[in-house]
Image: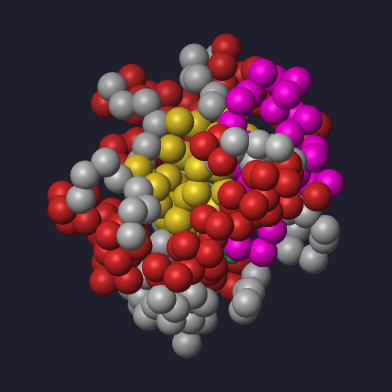
Amino acid sequence: MLFVGSAQFDRKPRNVYAVATMNPHAGLAEVRREIEAACRDAGRDPAGVTLVAIAKTFDAAAIEPVIDAGQRVFGENRVQEAKAKWPPLLARHRAIELHLVGPLQSNKARDAVALFDAIHSLDRDSLAGALAKEIARQSRRPALFVEINTGAEAQKSGVTPQDADAFIGACRERHGLAIAGLMCIPPFDEAPAPHFALTAQIARRNGLALLSMGMSADFKIAIAFGATHVRVGTAIFGARTKAP
Ligand SMILES: *Cc1c(COP(=O)(O)O)cnc(C)c1O
C-alpha cells in the first residue's frame, strides 16, 4: 500500500480535491476485516473499535459510495474543508458522525462545535477555554480527545506526556469540560507500539475510556494496545494525490 507521511498532506492546497483511486467498497471491506482480525487476536470485541474514515482531500463523489457501503463515521482534518463539503452530505444521509482529527485554531471553535461530533485535537488551554464557551453557547457536546505529542516532536501539536495529567485536570476543573479520551500520532519514522502504549497508560491513570490511535499503516497494532477509534484514510479511499 502506498503510504505518505501526514506532514505532506497538510501542505495540500485547500480546494484541490483528490480523485479516489481505489474501489471504496473493497478498501472499506478489507479494513473492516482487518479490524475484526486484530480484535480477535487481541481478545477484544470489534464493537469496541470505531472506524473513523478520514475523508480529507476527497470530494462528495468519492465519499458518497463509502456512505452507501454502510460507513457512518467520518473524519476531516480541516474545519474549512469540512464546512464546505459536509453540510450537503449531512442533509442527504442520516446518522453521519463527523470527527475533527486535525489541529484546531481557537477562532474556529465555534464552527468546529457546530459541525463536529468529536474533536480529537484538544491540546492547549486557550482552545479548552474557547471550546468550553462554545459548548455552553450552542448546547452541543462533541466528544473531546486530548492530543498527546508522545514523541515530544517540536513541529507537532499535542501536549507532552509530562504535561498531560495537569492539562487534563485543567480541562476538567478550570474549564468544566468532559474529556472522553486521548489521541496520538506517533512520529512517522518510529515504531508506533511504544507511543500507543504510553498513550494508553496516560488514559488509564486519568480514567479515560477512549483512545484515538492508529492510521492506515498501523491501526492493527493500535488495536492491540487498546485503540477504540482508528483513523483510516488511505486504506479506504486510496492514496491522496500530493500538492502540485
Ligand atoms: C490523514 C490523517 C489520518 C489518516 O491517515 P491514513 O494514513 O491515510 O490512514 C489519520 N489521522 C490524522 C490526524 C490525519 O491527519
Ligand 1 lies in quarter: bottom right
Q: Can residue 204 be seen in this view?
A: yes
Q: 18 above or below 63?
A: below
Where the N terminus falls, by quadrant? bottom right
User: Foreground residue, 209 or 133?
Assistant: 209
Where does residue 86 sit, x and y in percent of width and height?
26, 55
Q: 31 above or below 109?
A: below
Tell me the quarter of the picture where residue 150 sits.
top right
- Residue occupying the point 49% across, 75% down: 238
Q: How many labels does the image show?
A: 0
Side (left or right) of 236 relative to 147: left
User: Foreground residue, 62 or 27?
Assistant: 27
Where does residue 204 sit, x and y in percent of width and height?
73, 24
Tell me the quarter of the picture where residue 237 sits.
bottom left
Q: Is residue 18 visible?
A: no
Q: 239 above or below 153?
A: below
Image color mode:
secondary structure
- Residue occupying the point 41% across, 62% down: 55
- Residue occupying the point 78% across, 46% down: 195
User: Foreground residue, 26 or 79?
Assistant: 26
Where does residue 156 sit, x and y in percent of width and height?
67, 54
Range of residues picked out in magenta = 194-218
Side (left or right) of 194 relative to 128: right
Q: Is residue 11 magenta?
A: no
Q: Is residue 208 magenta?
A: yes
Side (left or right) of 43 relative to 1: right
Side (left or right) of 23 relative to 191: left
Tell me the quarter of the picture where residue 216 sits.
bottom right
- Residue occupying the point 75% across, 29% down: 202
